[in-house]
Image: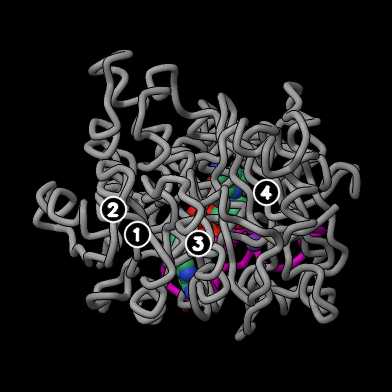
Amino acid sequence: MSSITSSKMRAIDANCAYIGMNPLQLMENAGAAIAREITSKLSSGKVLFVAGRGNNGGDAFVAARHLAMNENYDVRLILLGNSSRIRTEESKQNFSLLSYSGLTELREIADSKELEKYSGWKDNDIIVDGVLGSGIKGAPREPESTAIDLINSSDSYIISIDSPSGYDLDGGEVVKSVVADTTITFHKMKTGLELPDSEKYAGLVKVAPIGVCRDAEEYVGIGDLMSLAHRNKYSHKGNSGRVLVIGGGAYYGAPALAAMAALRTGADIVTVAVPENVADTVASFSPNLIVIPLEGDRLNPSNIPVLKNLLETHDVAVIGPGLGRERETLETVEQLLPFCRKAVVDADALFGLTLPVKSEGKFILTPHSAEFSRLSGSEVPKELDSKKNIVRRFASDKDVTLLLKGKIDVISDGSVTRLNRTGNSGMTVGGTGDVLTGITGALFAVNDAMSAGSCAVFINGSAGDLAYEEKGNGLLATDIIARITDVILGVL
Ligand SMILES: NC(=O)C1=CN([C@@H]2O[C@H](COP(=O)(O)OP(=O)(O)OC[C@H]3O[C@@H](n4cnc5c(N)ncnc54)[C@H](O)[C@@H]3O)[C@@H](O)[C@H]2O)[C@@H](O)CC1
Ligand SMILES: [K+]
């Protein structure tokens, strides 16, 4: 079983909530797994739980409740801090149940000195460490730091919940950590617990399932958006992505839709390079667009020097919307691609593609079924597992990230394959593919291809679903662009 990072685990947790699981359900299963571990290790005895104010502590509250049901155990719990400062609702709720759970002792201790004076550290058979889990940031502060020292200086058997407190589940520097005999981590093995040194802190590591829905991992959800690159307060212009849209000539709406979608997704700068015959029209759609007119009525080889310069100053190129399929246009696309560091290739540009592209560049292809059939030379199977296989194989063989649009979108970079089910029947209207490429370009400018592609289909489909609630099958591509911010607001 492959291991995951703590941010991937957080994304899975959030995806569970997104599809309707109450966070209490996962916490209940996590706590129950800890209680089971204790009862399998020891048929009776004294157990001290040490809990922090985050959800790691919440798991400890649940475990203590489960264990105290069994009269063979003497169960005590110390909360590090005041219960009014417990961080989440689910943790608060589980803490309040402890007053009715028959614990021998339930204490709230915020002060390190008082913690040191506490008499219950001695003579425990087991100490359960629920101080800090995957939510730790930086070196442990007080009173957590003293609690870690006290746990380590006891001679009890130590079981850590999810992670030895203080240890970095992603394998970063460890300043101070609980040294556990056993660590029960949840759902999947964590990257940091597989490192050669980890046994020193984690002891024996076991993975406990906590009832995560399978789709929360395979289907893209809101949690995946939370893992994308975030703008911080020190960001300045350009940090959040410069996107170059190369399109138009045969049409003018398509490149404008892609560019507006990229702006609404948060790109700082979007430049639209289009043949001069449509440049004024594209510019007239919005004063937010920077439009560069290219010589001629269609993209052609004489445009290459200008475009090469533009590629230098942009993070990603979105190539295809509204280009048309003139031979010289497709030849130009083919010559241009090797100069792209990152490119999203869609629509007509897919016809100018020879794969694999001979360059170091990274490419996301966004075909629909018919376009993919032509690219791969075979029918796209209807059955989902076969579809996933064919997409994964193509991505791996051609060294691209493939985003196959459909009722269920399939995204693969050849090693990871994800699915997306947002979107609706109203989105068969023209222009929605252009919106998707724009969103993909904006995300790809500041993220890896797989995260960009999978989050882009999710955002596009979710914005489409919001537009559908308002407009039904009469929704337009511009209505989707107008709802992008409703999907990403507060998340990205
Ligand atoms: N749905 C979920 O999110 C689930 C989470 N689970 C548990 O929740 C844990 C993660 O919970 P949280 O995200 O609440 O985080 P934690 O409980 O790991 O810790 C976060 C808390 O510690 C504080 N903190 C952070 N860094 C600190 C430091 N260096 N020194 C002192 N205090 C520090 C934070 O302010 C916060 O109050 C997992 O490890 C796992 O045990 C499980 O209940 C399963 C489901
Ligand atoms: K812990």
When the figure is inspected, residue 272 is found, relative to residue 61, above or below; the finding is: below
Q: Which mark is residue 245?
A: 1
Query: Does 449 appear in magenta?
Result: no
Verify CB contact (< 8 Å) between mark 1 and mark 2.
Answer: yes
How crowded is the residue under tag 3: few (<14 C-alpha within 10 Å), some, or many (20+)? Answer: many
Q: Verify whether residue 111 appears in magenta.
A: yes
Residue 295 location (% of width, % of height): 27, 67
Q: Position of residue 6 (x, y in %)?
A: 61, 60
Label 4 – label 1 distance at C-alpha: 23 Å
- Frontmost of labels 4 and 3 is 3
Name the residue beneath numbered marker 2. 259
User: Which residue appears at 79% of the width and 45% of the height?
Assistant: 208
- Mark identifier at residue 412: 4
Q: Residue 377 or 229: which is nearer the viewer? A: 377
Q: Which region is colored magenta?
A: 108-134
Determine the CA span between mark 2 and mark 3: 18 Å
Q: Which residue is mark 3?
A: 333
Q: Earlier in the sequence, mark 1 or mark 2?
A: 1
> Label 2 sits on what residue type?
Ala
Mark 1 crowd level (few <14, some 14–19, many ≥20, 10 Å Cα): many
Label whose residue precedes the other's in the sequence (2 or 4)? 2
Quarter location, residue 2: bottom right
Residue type, label 1 = Val
Closer to the chain start, of discs 1 and 3, is 1
| Image spot of residue 133 (x, y percent) | 60, 61
Q: Is residue 26 left or right of residue 296?
A: right
- Considering the numbered disc 3 on the image, is that residue within a helix, a strand or a loop? helix
Q: What is the quadrant of residue 240 in the picture?
A: bottom left
Q: Is residue 17 left or right of residue 3?
A: left
